[in-house]
Image (tube, coloured by chain):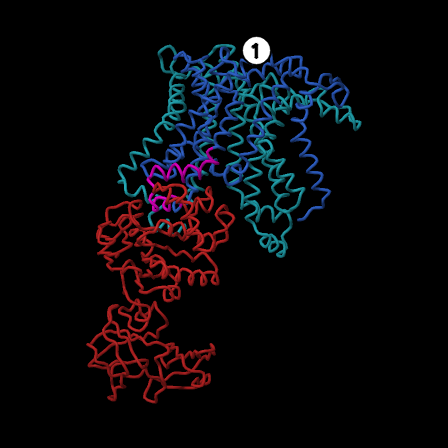
Chain colours: A blue, B cyan, C red
């Protein structure tokens, strides 16, 4: 079954082109001042478009809106989901398995169709086009990360760690704050980052609930991508995505086969 | 430690045992109440309301809106295209990732590590970014065309705005999950099991079919369901890369609701999509319950 | 010092500990010994307060602790998994109990230093648990308990995850430390040798019950229940029926002053001796273990016997020899009937087989 390195290199080359090629193109465009057919690389480099964009209100406002929306939705989701994750992992109560499972089952609902139904209700409630309406639906995108990763993390803390502290005289609150929480912290942080990035780039909810009054960064990106000037969308992509990519890399150890498979129940 | 924990009654730590079971249940329910409420108000409630309202026409209960949908050639074309796009893209993604997982299973070293890392890359790239990047990469006069022309190939026809565009994006996005799950599943087949099969005269195809595939069958099914559901409910990818007609259901619904302001028609489209999804989704949930039941 | 009084505990209706009572003296090391699932770990957790007893009481130095939570009891527990907190250094781990007690920083540092010195890890204070070997981690876990000066130290199979060699040396270390500090200690183990070497007295548990509470040698020589007799050391077990003061022992009738009925007659391998009046058996195997020789035998009825004897007394394989017991432990319904020294063969023929 062992293949020659030639086969491996061929696969690697194809993969590299397919996986990196598209993103590379965008990065090249972001730093290109002139790139005309049929040159394989930009003929003039620079960050001219970066400075041009950064002063424009039509660019700044959506980016700030997105950052505010994402921070609020992610933090609110964390606030309600992390304690719930602790309960799912550590407490016994009726309906626990069913409720925990409903969070995975919600994955099977087509999101866009669901947002259509929410949009119709929000239309009646006057929430369409409102900042808080968007924040509410975007919280939904965070819930899966915010429930599953922390629940698995709390479950993974051996009870003996907490018992040892309790046994040495610590109060229950102290055990939670000084033992349980620090032990779960990396996983909690990872769930926050994953949820944050997925909300930041969320399109469906923002489009159906927010447009046209609330313009988020991804919606701006969509409208910029239809423009003649290629660079502006490319700059926005690089500007927002690269920091997120670095943040996501930090959460890599929670993106193992086991972690992901658990999240999706595979 | 596991034995220790079970002896003392499951994974409930000692400090909870002092509070009564009733108190614990109350605390648990209180802590999960908010996210469960959020889930119910934002999924169950709108869904039920929507299904009911699609059957209410001017205060009368009838299915005329569905009759319209299923007699409208354009709606049907969109639905059919969505299903085809989902099926072809999901199956292709599975086939490719199975190939990659097989390669990873039987090779080691730097090349395998790099292939593994590359196949996980899409986990870190949001849908909107890759859609835009593919437009720039594969589009007319894009980098891919430029590269092909460098090696003398001048007959490139861009997949941009054809069904191939979304197909490539869907496959690109879908790779990590099956690669992770399948390569984890395949490592459970020991080298000895493969060698034993070969010793008994099994060819590579038979080994694949009878030794390797059964090990990952359930993972394959779950991965297929998840990928397929993701694709038929997608908006960004077909909007950015797909053809103007036929449309995928996401784009169709958005245009019906956002541009034509026909909420009733959009809801009917959403219900149709949900019903189809619930068949696949129900199967996904059943498979998952079975695998969880096996664990507990 | 520590009084355990008729403690019972059940999990979901399944009893784990049944009416166990015993008293531990100050400075004593008591082992809870028994097969896995016998309730010894549960009993330890009940003593620590991590698990509530269903009934019974626990007193430490006369004070009733039955209703006190684990964090209010003067006990400290070393876990099998060492349960060190991976986000704290060794010194922070050890100092935790003192920080909980609100001691000033300087005093904490001083005490932590002293106790790390005691367990021979004074240079490891700044390390993280992940950088320790299994033996070192378990020593830190011990130090973490010692530093709070518990009235009772509880240890739940602390060495069972370690390899045999390390286990032995840690055992020695613990014993000398415990003597030096005059620490009242309860030590849970399923390892007989460990219990015999460490303990001043041993509580043998089986199916949640206390079978016997005695010094190691006494457990071996005078087992009070069939369970203890079969669990501690090797035994040749012969199940027979006593009738009119006689019983068939491996085909040889013996005169036994026992009441009529079923009885299990147990004999240690070293308590057998050759005697022409004894039970007849064929030698199947002879193993020279060095200090003693182990002889495996089979009786005419197919029962298996083990005899340990000095090397020079060992018979050849396939030899037919006759054996008598020097001492028999007779049990009925699991309880000791009598311990019989030098039983005599019955001379009358026709005893029931």
In this view, C334 is above or below B92:
below
Q: Quadrant of residue B30?
A: top left
User: Magenta segment: does it hold A175?
Assistant: yes
- How many circles with numbers are drawn on the protein? 1
- In this rendering, position of residue A79 left or right of residue C264: right
Q: Of residues B179 and A151, which is closer to you in this image?
A: A151
Q: Quadrant of residue C270?
A: bottom left
In this picture, which residue range is highlighted in magenta?
A161-188
Which class describes the residues within 10 Å of circle 1: few (<14), some (14-19), or many (20+)?
few
- In this rendering, position of residue C261 left or right of residue C134: left
Q: Quadrant of residue C251?
A: bottom left
In this view, A173 is above or below B83:
below
Seen at 67% across and 26% down, the residue is A24
Residue C263 position in % (x across, y down) = 25, 74
Residue B186 position in % (x across, y down) = 57, 45
Q: Chain of mark 1?
A: A
- In this rendering, position of residue C90 left or right of residue C148: right
In this view, C193 is above or below C115:
below
Q: Of residues B238 and A100, which is closer to you in this image?
A: A100
Residue A222 position in % (x across, y down) = 58, 17
User: Magenta segment: does it hold A107?
Assistant: no
Seen at 51% across and 18% down, the residue is A66
Quarter that holds the C terminus of chain C: bottom left
* Secondary structure character of the magenta stretch overall: helix
**Residue that numbered label 1 is attached to:** A58
Q: Which secondary structure, mark 1?
A: helix
Does residue C353 show up?
no
Q: Residue furthest right?
A: B152
Quarter that holds the N terminus of chain C: bottom left
Q: Of residues C130 and C233, which is closer to you in this image?
A: C130
């Amino acid at each position: 079954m062992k293949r020659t390195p030639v086969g491996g290199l061929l696969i690697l080359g194809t993969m590299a082109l397919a996986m990196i090629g598209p993103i590379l193109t965008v990065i090249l465009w972001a730093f290109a001042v002139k790139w005309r057919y049929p040159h394989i690389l930009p003929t003039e480099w620079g960050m001219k478009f970066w400075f041009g964009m950064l002063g424009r209100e039509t660019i700044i406002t959506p980016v700030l809106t997105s950052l505010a929306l994402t921070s609020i939705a992610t933090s609110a989701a964390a606030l309600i989901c992390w304690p719930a994750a602790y309960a799912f992992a550590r407490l016994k109560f009726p309906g626990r398995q069913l409720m925990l499972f409903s969070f995975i089952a919600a994955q099977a609902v087509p999101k866009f169709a669901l947002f259509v139904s929410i949009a119709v209700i929000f239309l009646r409630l006057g929430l369409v086009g409102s900042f808080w309406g968007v924040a509410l639906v975007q919280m939904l995108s965070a819930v899966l990360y915010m429930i599953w990763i922390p629940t698995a993390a709390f479950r993974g803390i051996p009870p003996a760690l907490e018992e040892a502290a309790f046994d040495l005289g610590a109060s229950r609150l102290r055990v939670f704050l000084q033992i349980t929480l620090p032990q779960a912290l990396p996983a909690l942080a990872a769930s926050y980052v994953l949820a944050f990035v997925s909300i930041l780039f969320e399109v469906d909810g923002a489009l159906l609930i927010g447009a046209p009054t609330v313009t988020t960064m991804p919606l701006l990106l969509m409208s910029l991508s239809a423009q003649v000037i290629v660079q502006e969308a490319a700059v926005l992509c690089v500007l927002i995505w690269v920091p997120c990519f670095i943040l996501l890399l930090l959460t890599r150890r929670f993106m193992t086969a086991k972690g992901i498979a658990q999240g999706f129940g595979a | 430690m596991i034995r220790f924990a079970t002896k003392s009654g499951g994974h409930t730590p000692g400090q909870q045992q002092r509070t009564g079971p009733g108190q614990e249940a109350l605390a648990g329910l209180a802590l999960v109440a908010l996210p469960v409420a959020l889930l119910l108000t934002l999924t169950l409630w709108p869904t039920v309301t929507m299904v009911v309202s699609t059957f209410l026409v001017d205060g009368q209960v009838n299915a005329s809106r569905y009759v319209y949908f299923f007699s409208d050639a354009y709606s049907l074309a969109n639905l059919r295209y969505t299903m085809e796009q989902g099926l072809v893209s999901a199956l292709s993604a599975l086939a490719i990732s199975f190939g990659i997982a097989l390669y990873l299973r039987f090779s080691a070293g730097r090349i395998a590590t790099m292939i593994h890392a590359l196949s996980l890359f899409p986990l870190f790239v949001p849908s909107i970014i890759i859609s835009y990047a593919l437009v720039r990469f594969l589009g007319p006069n894009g980098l891919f065309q430029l590269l092909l022309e460098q090696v003398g190939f001048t007959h490139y026809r861009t997949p941009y705005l054809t069904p191939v565009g979304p197909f490539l994006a869907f496959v690109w996005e879908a790779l990590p999950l099956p690669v992770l799950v399948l390569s984890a599943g395949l490592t459970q087949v020991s080298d000895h099991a493969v060698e034993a099969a070969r010793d008994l005269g099994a060819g590579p195809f038979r080994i694949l079919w009878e030794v390797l595939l059964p090990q990952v069958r359930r993972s394959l099914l779950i991965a297929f369901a998840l990928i397929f559901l993701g694709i038929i409910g997608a908006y960004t990818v077909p909007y950015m890369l797909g053809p103007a007609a036929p449309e995928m259901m996401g784009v169709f619904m958005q245009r019906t609701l956002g541009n034509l302001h026909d909420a009733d028609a959009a809801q009917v489209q959403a219900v149709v999509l949900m019903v189809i999804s619930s068949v696949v989704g129900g199967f996904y949930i059943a498979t998952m319950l079975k695998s969880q039941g096996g664990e507990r | 010092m520590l009084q355990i009084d008729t403690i019972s505990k059940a999990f979901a209706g399944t009893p784990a500990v049944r009416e166990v009572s015993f008293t531990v003296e100050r400075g004593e090391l008591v082992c809870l010994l028994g097969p896995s699932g016998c309730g010894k770990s549960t009993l330890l957790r009940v003593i620590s307060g991590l698990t509530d007893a269903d009934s019974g009481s626990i007193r430490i130095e006369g004070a009733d602790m039955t209703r006190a939570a684990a964090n209010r009891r003067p006990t400290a527990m070393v876990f099998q998994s060492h349960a060190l907190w991976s986000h704290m250094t060794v010194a922070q781990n050890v100092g935790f109990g003192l920080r909980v007690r609100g001691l000033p920083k300087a005093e904490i540092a001083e005490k932590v230093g002293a106790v790390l010195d005691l367990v021979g890890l004074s240079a490891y204070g700044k390390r993280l648990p992940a950088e320790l070997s299994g033996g070192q981690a378990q020593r830190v876990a011990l130090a973490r308990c010692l530093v709070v000066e518990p009235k009772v130290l509880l240890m739940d199979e602390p060495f069972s995850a370690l390899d045999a060699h390390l286990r032995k040396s840690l055992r020695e270390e613990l014993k000398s430390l415990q003597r030096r500090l005059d620490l009242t200690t309860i030590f849970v183990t399923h390892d007989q040798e460990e219990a015999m070497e460490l303990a001043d007295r041993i509580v043998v548990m089986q199916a949640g019950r206390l079978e016997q509470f005695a010094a190691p040698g006494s457990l071996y020589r005078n087992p009070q229940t069939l369970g203890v007799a079969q669990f501690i050391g090797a035994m040749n077990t012969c199940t027979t029926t006593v009738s009119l003061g006689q019983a068939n022992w491996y085909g040889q009738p013996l005169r036994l002053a026992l009441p009529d009925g079923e009885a299990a007659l147990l004999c240690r391998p070293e308590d057998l001796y050759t005697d022409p009046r004894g039970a007849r058996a064929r030698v199947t195997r002879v193993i020279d273990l060095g200090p003693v020789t182990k002889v495996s035998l089979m009786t005419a009825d197919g029962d298996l016997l083990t005899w340990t004897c000095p090397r020079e007394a060992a018979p050849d394989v396939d030899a037919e020899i006759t054996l008598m017991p020097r001492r028999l432990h007779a049990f009925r319904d699991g309880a000791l009937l009598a311990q019989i020294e030098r039983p005599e063969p019955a001379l009358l023929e026709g005893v029931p087989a």
